Every structure is written in C-alpha cells, then in structure tokens.
C-alpha cells in the first residue's frame, strides 16, 4: 500500500481529506516561507539561504527537494562553471500564492504583535 511522506496510507481504501493533502505538501517549518520568497522572483540557493538566516543548508536542500517532488517548485540547473541553480514557482506553486496572501491578511487581522 502506498504511503504519504508521513507514513499514512493513501489510495482507494481511505478518503483523503483535501486539507490533509495540502498539509502534506506544505508541512515543514520553512516551506511556506520558501514559497513566499519565491512568489516575487526566481532565486538562487544562496539567496534563499540569506533570506532565511536560521535555516541550515541541509534543511533548505531537503525542503526545496520536497517542494520540487510535489511540483510546487522548479529547479533549473545551468551548465556553466561554477554551476548555477535557480528555483522558481511552478504554475501549481503560483496558484498557492493567494492562499499565502490570505494567511498573511488573517495574521494581520487576528494576531497582535507582542
């Protein structure tokens, strides 16, 4: 039986909640912030790492790979020396931006900075 990234069974035998499917894609401390930073422009790995100073190189790599596997992020490798790699949102990733914007608006409206 196929399993999700978190070990839950998937397939015909259970009804998968659409919110759970979305959570499976964006789960991870940094994924939402990575998507937000890619929403305005294509970025290189080191640029993303500078924008997220508390993330380790390994975690950033893993989160980007998972987002790529889930077809939210596109990784473009240029054949040059030194190698150049850029990350951008796929059409699926771009379709998620209004949700991120709604989350930001909800936060501004309901959460008080302390």
Image: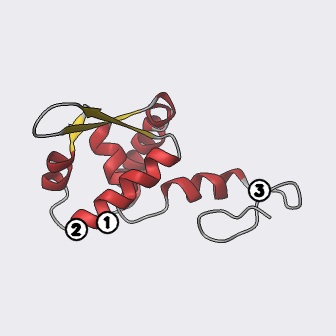
Q: Quadrant of the N terminus?
A: bottom right
The residue beneath circle 1 is 59
Nearer the observer, 103 or 27: 27
**Label 2, label 3: how far apart the Cα atoms are:** 32 Å
Q: Does the residue at mark 2 contact the one at mark 3 (Cβ under 8 Å)?
A: no
Q: Residue at x 59, y 64 (%)?
A: 5
**Label 1, label 3: how far apart the Cα atoms are:** 28 Å
Q: Residue at x 51, y 33 (%)?
A: 92
SS at mark 3? loop
Earlier in the chain: of badge 2 and badge 3, it is 3
Earlier in the chain: of badge 1 and badge 3, it is 3
Residue 106 position within the rendered picture, expressed as x and y whole percent measured from the top left: 43, 50
- Say whether residue 75 is left or right of residue 83: right
The residue beneath circle 3 is 16
Nearer the observer, 27 or 12: 12
Which-is-in-front pick, marks 1 and 3? 1
Please tell me whether residue 93 is drawn above or below residue 27 in the rendered image: above
Residue 94 position within the rendered picture, expressed as x and y whole percent measured from the top left: 44, 32
- Say whether residue 7 is left or right of residue 79: right
Q: Residue at x 48, y 38 (%)?
A: 96
Nearer the observer, 26 or 106: 26
Q: Which mark is residue 77?
A: none
The residue beneath circle 2 is 56
Q: Quadrant of residue 87?
A: top left
**Label 2, label 1: how far apart the Cα atoms are:** 5 Å
């Amino acid at each position: 039986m196929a399993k999700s990234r978190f070990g839950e069974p998937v397939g015909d035998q259970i009804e998968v909640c659409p919110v759970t499917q979305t959570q499976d894609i964006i789960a991870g401390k940094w994924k939402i912030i990575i998507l937000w930073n890619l929403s305005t422009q294509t970025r290189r790995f080191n640029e993303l790492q500078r924008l997220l100073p508390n993330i380790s190189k390994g975690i950033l790599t893993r989160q980007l790979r998972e987002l790529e596997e889930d077809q939210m992020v596109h990784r473009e490798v240029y054949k040059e020396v030194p190698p150049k790699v850029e990350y951008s949102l796929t059409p699926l990733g771009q379709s998620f931006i209004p949700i991120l914007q709604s989350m930001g608006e909800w936060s501004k409206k309901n959460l008080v900075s302390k």
